[in-house]
Image (tube, rainbow, N blue to C red):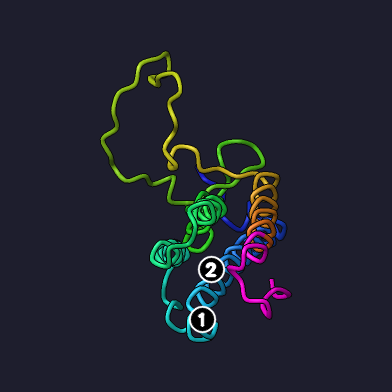
Amino acid sequence: MSVAPSDCITERHLLLFGTIVHRFARYEVLMQRIMATVTGSHLADVMLLTKTLTPDQKRIALLDLLRHRAIPLDRFDAVYKYLTIPETFSLLLSDIEHSVWVAGKSSHSIQPDWILRPRPTIKPLHSGEDGRSEGFLEDYEDKVEYSLEQLRETAATLSENYQGFAAYCRSVGLLAENDAKVG
């Protein structure tokens, strides 16, 4: 039986959830700033045009724009690599925004409530003692459980990657000069 959400979510969980959501917002604004610089537009115009896009849609729009503008391949690859980190955590962001959280199976962990009511699916059989083959990568639905430390590490990873991404974009001219102090 699951624990009621109010019994397992602490203020620290909520603080880390808020931190993670804010980190994603910073990435979204940074992507919009890059779009504005590359197109020679005002940031407000780009923000208006992209405000209804999800973070992933903004990422795709930015990458498409960089391809269209024939940005050197090494710069495109670097931007792509930096944006892989937030993409990796996008399912967590969605769960934070759209799920009620309950106690996880492991002690001191939490998980989205939807995991307790999985959709019926057909999964392939895997060899091995537990039915899984060597190197089997669990589905997101099979392993979504977070401790406070894992949430803290996620927030720190997002922050460190963002700082590196912003610095890189400044160094190669993907951010306007007057934009260098923002973010």
What is the x, y in percent for residue 141? 43, 42
Which quarter of the picture shows residue 162? bottom right
Give the answer, above or below, for where 14 lies relative to 38: above
Can I make out residue 133 in this image? yes
Left or right for 88, reference 19:
left
Which residue type does callout 2 highlight?
Answer: Met
Left or right for 89, reference 56:
right
Q: Earlier in the sequence, mark 2 or mark 1?
A: 2
Give the answer, above or below, for where 154 lies relative to 128: below
Foreground: 87 or 74? 74
Mark 2 lies on residue: 31
Residue at left offset 42%, top offset 81%: 49
Mark 1 lies on residue: 40
Give the label, 2 or 1, closer to the camera: 1
Q: Quadrant of the C terminus?
A: bottom right
Residue at left offset 46%, top offset 84%: 48
Residue segment shown in magenta: 168-183
* Residue 67 shown in magenta: no
Q: Residue furthest left?
A: 122
Give the answer, above or below, for where 78 lies relative to 14: above
Secondary structure beneath label 2: helix
